[in-house]
Image: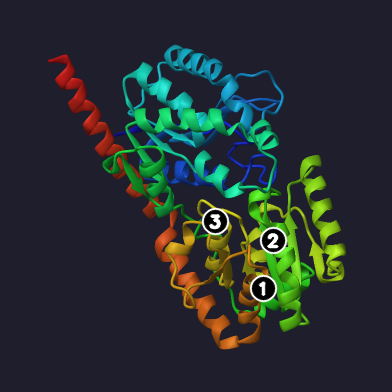
């Protein structure tokens, strides 16, 4: 296996990603890191995405790897919930370009269900294997949101019925699914009727060259540079309902009762996003109603170059998600030596040893979550344990090169199976 066609359609995908823009977060980091490591391992990679606005056709990253943009759906941004309306146009344009340029691939590797739908059709046309990573599952997201949103409004916004139906098709038809967590594997087999042999769990990875601990004397300088304090709790990520930032605010009175000097640093939302600004505005109003607005530092957008230092500057990292397929930001924080309190509603919780590598709690129980946030602040020995063991855990299990090698083994197995089936049919 020498050549890989990766597909990730939504968001701003580029060699230097504009993280924080709409639909441009953990998945974009995931596909870029994997593409880079595949190329380091000697594989030729085209990471195909949508061309819109004024983006160039290619970003040539190295001699083995390029981001390749295919135009479809006019030139305006399209949110991921609506991307599948344009999948057929993408498939037609992509296949025409592949054949015109004479490109050959051994496997299609797609990401998220919009690209999965396109990837399945492209793989069938090319007669090659298709491997898919869901990143999140429509059934899980719908169930996890529960009664927090009106049913009609939820369907209008997220289009779950159509999404779940098309997810089912992709998971049934593709050669193999690579899930990022154990709960995802369980849901794929129970809710999407996948054969267990057709699904493998491989966790996401971190960039070991960016996310690592530094000595405490350096942390003090970093805090001064970023206006952060020794007892700061950090929450960081996109402004989205499932991230549970409102639940975190409800947990803060408990934290402040136990640690009066504590403060929340809320690095929430993207750059130049009216929708994110509205969401943050609602959080600020909630903070005022809870009478904790003076205990929160709002940072909103963190540049990629500052991200590791913001993790390091915090005393504790908080991930209060209603649901979280994995939680890359928590792994990045842990790799930087920052103790993390994560949600119980996700796959990462099943991988860590509580009290050794991280803490977890249910963000729906405000007192519980607030108490867990306070423990590393109250007990320095516990904080030191979580810092050291959390960093070891993150680096040992989530380095991208090791993750990429596991992926390539799955690709080869899938390709061999495809070849055997093709030979049987031809004979």
> Which residue is nearer to you in this view: 333 or 166?
166
Q: Are the residues tagged 1 and 3 within 8 Å (C-beta)?
A: no
Circle 1 or circle 3, nearest the eye: 1
In what quadrant of the picture does the C terminus appear?
top left
Q: Are the residues tagged 1 and 2 within 8 Å (C-beta)?
A: no
Which of marks 3 and 1 precedes in the sequence? 3
Compared with 233, 70 (above or below) is above
Residue 267 left/right relative to 191: right
> Which residue is nearer to you in this view: 385 or 56?
385
Q: Residue furthest left?
A: 427
Disc 3 is placed on an element classified as loop
Q: Say which residue appears at 66% left-offset and 59% top-offset.
A: 307
Task: Tell me where residue 262 appears, x and y as whole percent.
Answer: 75, 77
Q: Which residue is mark 3?
A: 327
Q: Which residue is mark 2?
A: 247
Disc 2 is placed on an element classified as helix
Tell me how far mark 2 sits from mark 3, CA to CA.
17 Å
Tell me how far mark 1 sits from mark 3, CA to CA.
22 Å
Compared with 120, 136 (above or below) is below
Residue 365 left/right relative to 3: right
Which of marks 3 and 2 precedes in the sequence? 2
Specify the label residue 367 is tagged with. 1
């Amino acid at each position: 296996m020498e050549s890989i066609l990766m597909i990730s359609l939504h968001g701003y995908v580029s060699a230097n990603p504009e993280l924080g823009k709409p639909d441009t977060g953990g998945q974009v980091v995931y596909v870029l890191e994997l593409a880079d490591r595949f190329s380091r391992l000697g594989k030729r990679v085209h990471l195909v995405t949508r061309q819109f606005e004024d983006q160039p056709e290619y970003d040539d990253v190295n001699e083995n790897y390029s981001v390749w943009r295919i135009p479809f759906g006019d030139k305006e941004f399209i949110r991921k919930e609506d991307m599948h309306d344009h999948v057929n146009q993408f498939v037609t344009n992509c296949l025409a370009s592949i054949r015109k340029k004479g490109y050959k691939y051994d496997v299609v590797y797609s990401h998220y269900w919009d690209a999965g739908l396109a990837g399945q059709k492209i793989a069938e046309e090319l007669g090659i294997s298709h491997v898919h990573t869901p990143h999140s599952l429509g059934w899980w997201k719908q169930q996890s949101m529960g009664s927090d949103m009106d049913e009609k409004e939820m369907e209008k916004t997220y289009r779950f019925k159509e999404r779940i139906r098309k997810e089912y098709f992709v998971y049934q038809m593709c050669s193999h699914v690579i899930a990022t967590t154990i709960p995802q594997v369980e849901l794929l087999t129970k809710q999407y009727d996948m054969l267990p042999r057709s699904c493998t769990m491989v966790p996401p990875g971190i960039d070991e060259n960016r996310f690592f601990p530094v000595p405490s004397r350096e942390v003090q300088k970093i805090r001064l540079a970023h206006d952060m304090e020794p007892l700061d709790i950090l929450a960081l990520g996109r402004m989205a309902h499932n991230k549970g930032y409102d639940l975190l605010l409800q947990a803060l009175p408990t934290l402040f009762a136990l640690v009066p000097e504590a403060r929340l640093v809320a690095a929430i939302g993207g750059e130049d996003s009216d929708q994110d600004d509205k969401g943050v505005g609602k959080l600020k109003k909630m903070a005022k109603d809870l009478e904790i607005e003076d205990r929160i530092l709002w940072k909103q957008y963190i540049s990629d170059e500052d991200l590791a230092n913001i993790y390091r500057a915090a005393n504790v990292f908080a991930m209060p998600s209603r649901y979280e397929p994995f939680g890359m930001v928590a792994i990045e924080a842990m790799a930087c030596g920052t103790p993390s309190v994560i949600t119980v509603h996700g796959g990462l919780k099943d991988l860590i040893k509580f009290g050794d590598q991280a803490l977890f709690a249910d963000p729906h129980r405000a007192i519980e979550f607030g108490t867990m946030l306070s423990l590393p602040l109250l007990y320095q020995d516990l904080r030191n344990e979580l810092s050291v063991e959390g960093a070891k855990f993150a680096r040992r299990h989530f380095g991208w090169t090791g993750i990429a090698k596991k992926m390539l083994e799955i690709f080869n197995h899938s390709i061999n199976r495809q070849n055997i089936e093709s030979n049987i049919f031809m004979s």
